[in-house]
Amino acid sequence: AAGVIQSPRHLIKEKRETATLKCYPIPRHDTVYWYQQGPGQDPQFLISFYEKMQSDKGSIPDRFSAQQFSDYHSELNMSSLELGDSALYFCASSGAGASYEQYFGPGTRLTVT
Amino acid sequence: AQTVTQSQPEMSVQEAETVTLSCTYDTSESDYYLFWYKQPPSRQMILVIRQEAYKQQNATENRFSVNFQKAAKSFSLKISDSQLGDAAMYFCAYLRLPFYGNKLVFGAGTILRVKS
């Protein structure tokens, strides 16, 4: 079965640079979520989109923005990167039947140096 | 705001034996969903089992089952016939309804070690 696809899988950036993370949900899923997981921590919710509209928002820094496109894929844009942004970023998707289940992608490991 | 508490930072179990991971949550809502996710060393988040709050029957998925006590706001995970591949971090998670776009609220996690 098709899963959530995230790219890139690994990303190394320097402080003050910009990063763009991409997420391709499971086919026919209409809801996308972004989570950030620091080392030894549980995933923290950033933002979600349902049918291309922002649905819920967590503790997402103003330096971050995201959107969901017409094909339902989503991008998380991160600017003025800080060392503390180094983390594993998950995208999850839900929808189409058992819509309350969120299926996670493999994550993008972002390292800021 | 909803909170999820996993009071066991780490648990160990002998291969082929049974282990129970604890989870409690706090909410004023009457309808919600609860989940257990597994995160092995690969860091992939894998959905293990779900429970709808309106259902009294405890969910089961093969060797995994839950003990859902709504009044006590308790949601424990039982793993039977533990296998080496069960070694992972396990997260309990809460989902408020309506669920379109609603976030999962996670507990801090429990590291499960399986001894051969």
Image (cartoon, rainbow, N blue to C red):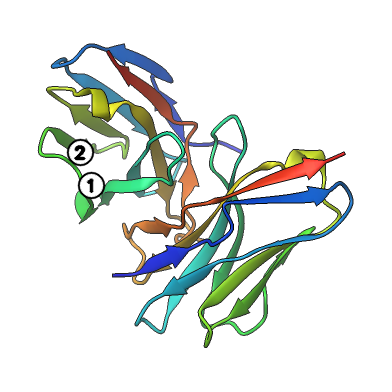
| Marks 1 and 2 share the same chain | yes
Q: Which mark is residue A35?
A: none
Tell which circle, 1 or 2, labels the residue nearer the N-terminal end: 1
Q: State whether residue A34 is above or below residue A98.
A: above
In this rendering, position of residue B24 left or right of residue A94: right
Q: In front: mark 1 or mark 2? A: 2
Query: Which disc number belongs to residue A67?
Result: 2
The quarter in which the N terminus of chain B is drawn is bottom left
Q: Chain of mark 2?
A: A
Residue A85, position as x, y percentages in the image = 26, 29
Q: Position of residue B36 (x, y in %)?
A: 57, 58
Q: For mark 1, does the 10 Å Cα neighbourhood hold few (<14), some (14 to 19), or many (20 or more) residues? A: some
Nearer to me, A20 or B73:
B73
Measuring from the top left, give residue B4's x and y in whole percent: 44, 65
Identify which residue, B17 or B67, lies in the foreground: B17
The amino acid type of the residue labelled 2 equals Gln
- Residue, disc 1: A52
